[in-house]
Image (spheres, helix red, strand yellow):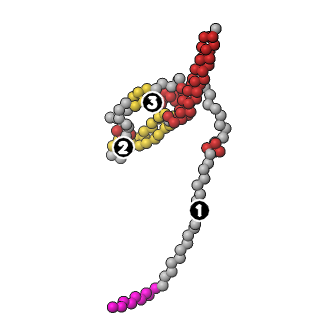
Amino acid sequence: MKTAFKFASAFAIILSATVFTAKAQQVNDADIKKNAAPVTNSLSFITRLEPVTYEYNKSDNKKLNLPEGKQYGFIASDAEQVTPWAIKTQNSWQTIGKNQQKAITTHEVDLQKLVPLLVGAIKEQQAEIEKLKQEVEALKKK
């Protein structure tokens, strides 16, 4: 059985395409940073920070999805006095009733920003230890 199709209208398909090429490029971070300088006096910052253990008050802050159990860290308002550039602020909205929300602003210490200070403090302490070792050796020889 043969079937014949007749079309009353004509149509054309026009395709247009743009070709993109991509290549991976590796950029050295030293090439995208400027004014790099050694971190000094790290120990003076680190010794002024007060590490604490704490638990989040989950019952009063259910919508914030806070972790359970003992946490280690810093109280952001205290750390802000020492390292204000390491404090990050997050804004969110919490539903408190039908058609009612309140703004919640939380502050936390960005621990990643403290890592260079920690490394600098360790290096400063190690230099002091090496100096004291040399002094002890010199005293032993007397």
**Left or right for 52, reference 85:** left
Mark 3 lies on residue = 73
| 3 drawn magenta | yes
Residue 41 lies, with reference to residue 10, above or below; the image says above
Mark 2 lies on residue = 95
Please identify the quadrant where the N terminus is shown: bottom left
Residue at point 59% right, 25% down?
Answer: 124
- Disc 2 crowd rating (10 Å Cα; few below 14, some 14-19, many 20+) is few
- Please name whichever residue, 97 or 106, is drawn nearer the observer in this view of the structure: 106
Q: Quadrant of residue 18?
A: bottom right
Please identify the quadrant where the C terminus is shown: top right
In the image, residue 100 lies at what x, y percent?
37, 44
Q: Nearer the viewer, mark 1 or mark 3?
A: 1
- Disc 3 crowd rating (10 Å Cα; few below 14, some 14-19, many 20+) is few
Q: What range is drawn magenta here? A: 1-9
Residue at point 53% right, 76% down?
Answer: 14
- Please name whichever residue, 98 or 3, is drawn nearer the observer in this view of the structure: 3
